[in-house]
Amino acid sequence: MRIIVISDSHGSSRTVTRIVEENLDRADMFIHLGDGADDVNEVLAKYPDIKLLRIKGNCDWQDHPRRLVTEAGGVKIFACHGDLHGVRSGIDRLYYAAKEAGCTVALFGHTHCRFEHYEDGIYFLNPGSCTRPHDGKKPSYGFIDILPSGIMTGTVDV
């Protein structure tokens, strides 16, 4: 199972559409982590049958959840934008929220910086920003592969 993770698109529905279309034949699910949560509306209109979840970020004004817990391939996933968990100061609060929810994967955005980490049974992934990175790298998105042999995360340049 492959999940594509997008964050911080900030009004670029064209970029979100391109990422989704490039992964339609490979991905089982898409998750947008906010700050551009409505950038997926065009994709959903064009591909109404895809599984696409979205989180409200600190720059979003629509009525989307601020966090969610979902299951994919037998793995529980915690997803949030990150601002309410203080991710600019580290992942401690995110770690405890994911642990309390019984999740194996914790996803977040907000910092516009790619981040992958594994700690105490939890895989952490920030896919970076697909339009405005703050880490000196190219715009990016992330992926999670849930395989019989384990979980793999990574980022891809847009």
Image: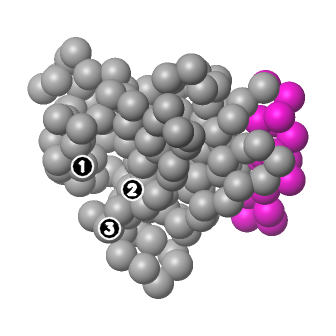
Q: What residue did someone put label 3 on? A: 157
Q: What residue did someone put label 1 on? A: 19
Secondary structure under the numbered disc 1 in the rendered image: helix
For label 3, the crowd category at 10 Å Cα-Cα, with few meaning under 14, some 14 to 19 and many 20 or more, is few
Do labels 2 and 1 touch, CB within 8 Å? yes
Q: Whole-percent x and y of residue 114?
A: 53, 66
For label 2, the crowd category at 10 Å Cα-Cα, with few meaning under 14, some 14 to 19 and many 20 or more, is many
Above or below residue 133? Residue 78 is above
Q: Earlier in the sequence, mark 2 or mark 3?
A: 2
Residue 100: say if magenta: yes
Which disc number belongs to residue 103?
none
State the predominant SS element of the stretch in magenta: helix
The residue lying toward the viewer, choosing from 74 and 36, is: 74
Q: Amino acid at mark 3?
A: Asp
Instruction: State the residue at coordinates (39%, 56%).
Output: 141
Q: Quadrant of residue 105?
A: top right
Q: Amino acid at mark 2?
A: Tyr
Q: Earlier in the sequence, mark 3 or mark 1?
A: 1
The reply to whether residue 94 is visible in this rendering is yes
Q: What residue did someone put label 2 on? A: 141
Q: CA distance from mark 2 to mark 1?
A: 8 Å
